[in-house]
Image (cartoon, rainbow, N blue to C red):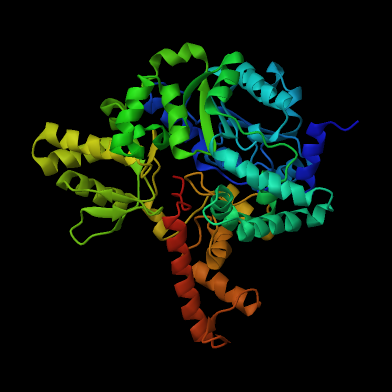
Amino acid sequence: MTTLTERIGKTYDKLPYVSAAFQVTAPEHLRTVAYLFGLDAPPPERARVLELGCAAGGNVIPFAARHPRAQVTGIDLSQVQVEAGQQAVAAMGLDNLRLIHASISDLGPGLGEFDYIICHGVYSWVPPEVQEAILRVSRQCLSAKGIAHVSYNTYPGWKAKEVVRDAMLLRADGRPDGDRLAYARGMINFLHEMAPADSVLAKIMQDNIETIRHGREYYLTHEFLELCNSPCYFRDFLASARRHGLEYLAEALPSAMFASNYGAHQAQLLLAECEGDQVRLEQLIDFLSNRTFRQTLLVHPANTGGIRYQLDAKRIARLHVAAKFVPASEDGTTWSTARGQTITAAKPTSQAAVAALNKAWPGTVPVATLLSIARTVAGKSDQGKDELISFLSALIVANAIHFRLDPMSLDPEVETRPRARPALRHLAAMGDAAPVKLFNEWHQPLEPTLTAAFVLPLLDGRRDRADLVAALVAAVGEQRFAFRRDDKVLDDPQDIALSAADAVNEALAWLSNNAVLVGNPR
């Protein structure tokens, strides 16, 4: 008899999930979050990393590429996805990463010990016995100072989404696999049109209609039509984790943990209600924000004594930070982030920090350097330090800045002979055949421009811009690429050469701004 777990695995064989990097699961990030809240986790350079439910490896491949001395293991139930990932890993030349076809339920201590265990997008989509196995394996295989990351759908936000799922299943059930999603989408369109104005149903449909209409097939099928999707309250998830000997550390996205992000008045009431209990505060915030998804970090109970949920100036001073801001006012006091957030840099110290961060992007700046700048600008060391730490704290709380314990730098030589990591170049050379998405140094998935995708496999640190332009011109001659002007294909060699030069410059600027280019080894 085929078990429910085996049936779930087959659904991913039939319709693989696009495998990509998730920024806040990067061990470098998890380590820094732990540090901010008082714990010292293992450094990434030689870390042992396990991902449960790795698909084709898109979320662990970038880490393995960044840290060749680390040891990385991925486990997945879908044989199709694992085999596709194994082929990609071999093509990329990564000898520190192994992908294994197995059920999480069959794993035990014999798998080994790991400093970081990641389980993203699995827990809510498997039967209860597999959920228990995820927590059991996380406890048995986690090193003494390790961190486990588990993401899951949460109530109360998913109560509304369950209406969407139930309605989609109602119309999809019994349909052939190839037709299920189309019928399910039709049901949501029907309910969106028929729901009485100002009704609860109308609000639910309005909140979800764009996702259902425009979401990708693999996402919608596995999110709304999968055999299992079991949201839970945060407190219930944590109770299960505690039964297995794990304790709460934080959320992978710390900004979600701070009451101040929900309004000054609400923050005052929340903090009074929770009486210093962070877990209670987290559950209250879920109700206030109607939260649908969590990414929770777990540790061994022996480590919880050092956890502090107030940001500490000494620990912030140890960080390396990065950000890119766009002016939102003429006086230089208001800036926008890539996500459209607005930040205020009212003081000269914060304005100087913004200038330094923008200059270094996409690399990091040591907070120690920013403190030195702040002291010079303020003229009083204590005042400058306090102003800068307050500004950086506000950026961390608002999720408006990247932070790491170790620097991420870019070598100026990339301007003349640009270089990308070999593994990334080999992946880019696979083109549409690649089973995982491209990635950058910040552990983010990439959607490169057409020219950037062409140039990327060539960035081995030996070619200069003229070489890249010549390669692009040759591709035009082979009819693999074309330039247009006024809807006409260019055929004049001089026009093609000029267009190719402009395109290469734009591609390199895009790759640099998106944290793809790295320095040449010395």
Quarter location, residue 137: top right
Q: Could you say which is closer to the camera, residue 504 or residue 219? A: 219
Judged from this view, the residue extending furthest toward the left is 379
Q: Could you say which is closer to the camera, residue 289 or residue 51? A: 289
Quarter location, residue 263: top left
> What's the residue at 52%, 40% (across, down)?
66
Residue 352 x, y percent position in the rendering: 20, 48
Question: As displayed, is residue 154 above or below residue 239?
Answer: below
Q: Could you say which is closer to the camera, residue 270 or residue 191? A: 191
Residue 423 x, y percent position in the rendering: 59, 47
Residue 8 x, y percent position in the rendering: 77, 38
> What's the residue at 49%, 84% (across, down)?
495
> What's the residue at 75%, 57% (across, down)?
183
Question: As displayed, is residue 497 above or below residue 469?
Answer: below
Residue 220 in view: yes
Position of 351 with respect to 146 (left or right) is left
> The C terminus appears in which quarter of the rendering?
top left
Residue 329 x, y percent position in the rendering: 23, 60
